[in-house]
Image: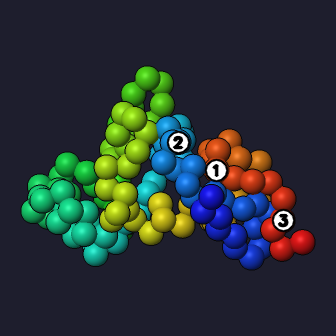
């Protein structure tokens, strides 16, 4: 097990489960995965694409921010980088928002929601 804990969260995350997960955190309801200019460059370089082609294919503007595109498939939204087997095609250069999941501030308040998204969570406060 690769257990990760973070102060203020009442769960432990076993990151090893990501290897067998079907990408539940990367699909479902529509949402935004915000990316920075540096993250876009890293992703495009990883995919061996120039920035313009990579942007047109994988990203879009939302006001003054940039988000990763989604595809609508089989009744749900899926991150454009989610592969059929459930893995992430850019895992090594995934955005910070993805790297920090499931330790998002919103899950301190909406505790039940995160358990629906991630089979790698172990209930209970690890600090007790």
Residue reaching furthest to the top: 74
Distance Cα–Cα, label 3 vs label 2: 23 Å
Colouring rule applied to residues: rainbow
Q: Is residue 58 left or right of residue 66?
A: left
Q: Is residue 122 left or right of residue 33?
A: right
Residue 10: tell me if it is visible.
yes
Residue drawn at (12%, 59%) of the image: 48
Residue at 57 percent across and 58 percent down: it is: 15
Q: Which residue is the site of mark 3?
A: 125
SS assignment at label 3: loop
The residue identified by callout 1 is 120
User: Is 42 displayed left or right of 2 in the figure?
Assistant: left
Q: Where residue 99 sits in the image (x, y, percent)?
A: 48, 65
| Image side of residue 91 versus residue 21, left or right | left
Q: Which part of the image, by quadrant, shows the C terminus? A: bottom right
User: Which residue ends up furthest to the front in the rendered image?
Assistant: 1
Which of marks 1 and 2 precedes in the sequence? 2
Q: Circle 1: is it few (<14), some (14-19), or many (20+) Cα within 10 Å?
A: many
Residue 127's quadrant in the figure?
A: bottom right
* Cβ atoms at labels 2 and 1 below 8 Å apart: yes
Mark 1–mark 3 distance (CA, rounded to whole Å): 15 Å
Q: Residue furthest right?
A: 128
- x and y percentages locating residue 18 in the rendered image: 52, 50
Q: Residue at left 39%, top 65%?
A: 95
Local crowd at mark 2 within 10 Å, few (<14), some, or many (≥20)? Answer: some
Find numbered disc 2 in the image and state the secondary structure of the residue it sits on: loop
Badge 1 marks a residue whose secondary structure is: loop
């Amino acid at each position: 097990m690769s257990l990760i804990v973070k102060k203020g969260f009442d769960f432990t995350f076993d990151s090893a489960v990501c290897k067998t997960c079907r990408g539940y955190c990367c699909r479902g309801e529509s949402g935004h995965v915000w990316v920075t200019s540096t993250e876009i460059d890293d992703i495009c370089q990883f995919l061996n694409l120039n920035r313009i082609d990579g942007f047109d294919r994988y990203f879009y503007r939302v006001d003054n921010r940039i988000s990763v595109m989604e595809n609508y498939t089989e009744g749900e939204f899926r991150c454009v980088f989610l592969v059929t087997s459930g893995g992430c095609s850019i895992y090594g250069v995934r955005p910070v928002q993805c790297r920090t999941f499931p330790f998002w501030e919103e899950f301190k308040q909406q505790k039940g929601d995160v358990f629906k998204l991630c089979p790698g969570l172990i209930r209970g406060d690890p600090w007790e």
